[in-house]
Image (cartoon, rainbow, N blue to C red):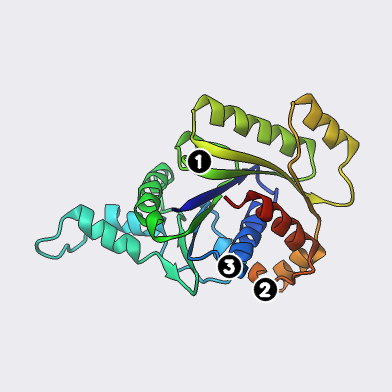
Amino acid sequence: MTIKIAVAGKGGCGKTSLTALVIRYLKKNDKVPILAVDADPNANLGESIGLKVGQTIGTILDGFQHDKISIPPGMTKEAWLEYKLNETIVESEGIDLITMGRGQGPECYCYPNLILKKFIEGLSDSYAYVVMDNEAGMEHLSRKTTDEVDALLLVSNHSVKGIRAIARILELVSELKLRVKKKVIIINLVPDTLDPLVAAELHRLGLKADVIIPEDKTIYRFDLEQKPLMEMPDVSPAVQAVAKMMTGLII
């Protein structure tokens, strides 16, 4: 049985770093194979987990729609597209990665999401875990890219705006009747203790912070040195917080 985890939140809340640390936890605890999905057009999950992205869903579709293609005799367009999409899978020990990206032009944004959703559905049964890093905001919910998941990690940075973004995402999840088994509210990048104003906003909106992830200078240093977060030390405060979260979350 495949367990699906999706990560959502506003821009700048540290979604990709958190996604990478979730993948790190799963890999370190032999919960493999894992399919990592970078569903953000501004793709950088690959860098965070140490995998080099080549082709993306967006570039394949762009070529498929606009370039003259030579389909082998006896093969349908759909079969040829599926074959080309499989070329976007970056394989490694225990972890495979697919990246949405985006093609060129004003209409290349929604279509890759639809193709990505179908592609993931076709691949999922081959993996123990699917972990999806979504684009900032709420569009992925409207397009139902984030649907039928076991855990939706709702990430806010240490800000009132981030908390409000989570509330709006929860409203949309309910409105669209998305199938989400468990919702986890995470406050990320907390410098010391939760600020009273952030706590007050959570209370006002009737929300509870399930997980607090401390601000971690090691993540900042790894980013500057362009090192994958898979190599983060076990003593890292963020790593320990994610491990504690995952211990309680693992289904």
The amino acid type of the residue labelled 3 equals Lys
Circle 3: element type: helix
How many numbered discs?
Answer: 3
Tell me the residue at 49%/28% (across/down): 177
Q: Are marks 1 and 3 in contact (CB under 8 Å)?
A: no
Q: Nearer the viewer, mark 1 or mark 3?
A: 3
Q: Is residue 67 visible?
A: no
Q: Which residue is mark 1?
A: 140
Instruction: Judge by depth and name the residue closer to the eye, 80 or 102.
Output: 80
Distance CA(mark 2)–CA(mark 3) = 11 Å
Tell me which label, 1 or 2, sits earlier in the chain: 1
Q: Which of the 4 quarters of the picture holds residue 42?
A: bottom right
Mark 2, other Cα within 10 Å: few <14 / some 14–19 / many ≥20: few
Q: Amino acid at mark 1?
A: His
Compare marks 2 and 3 and give the one earlier in the sequence: 3
Which sits earlier in the primary sequence, circle 1 or circle 3? 3
> In the picture provided, is 29 more to the left or to the right than 74?
right
- Pick the front one: 183 or 63: 183
Residue designated by label 2: 231
How far apart are the alpha carbons under marks 1 and 2? 29 Å
* Direction from residue 46 to residue 74 in the image, left or right: left
Q: Residue at x 86, y 52 (%)?
A: 191
**Quarter occupied by residue 156:** top right
Say which residue appears at 61% left-offset and 56% top-offset: 19
Residue at 66% x, 54% y is: 246
Residue picked out by circle 3: 27
The spot of residue 51 in percent (x, y) is: 53, 71
Secondary structure of the residue carrying tag 1 is helix
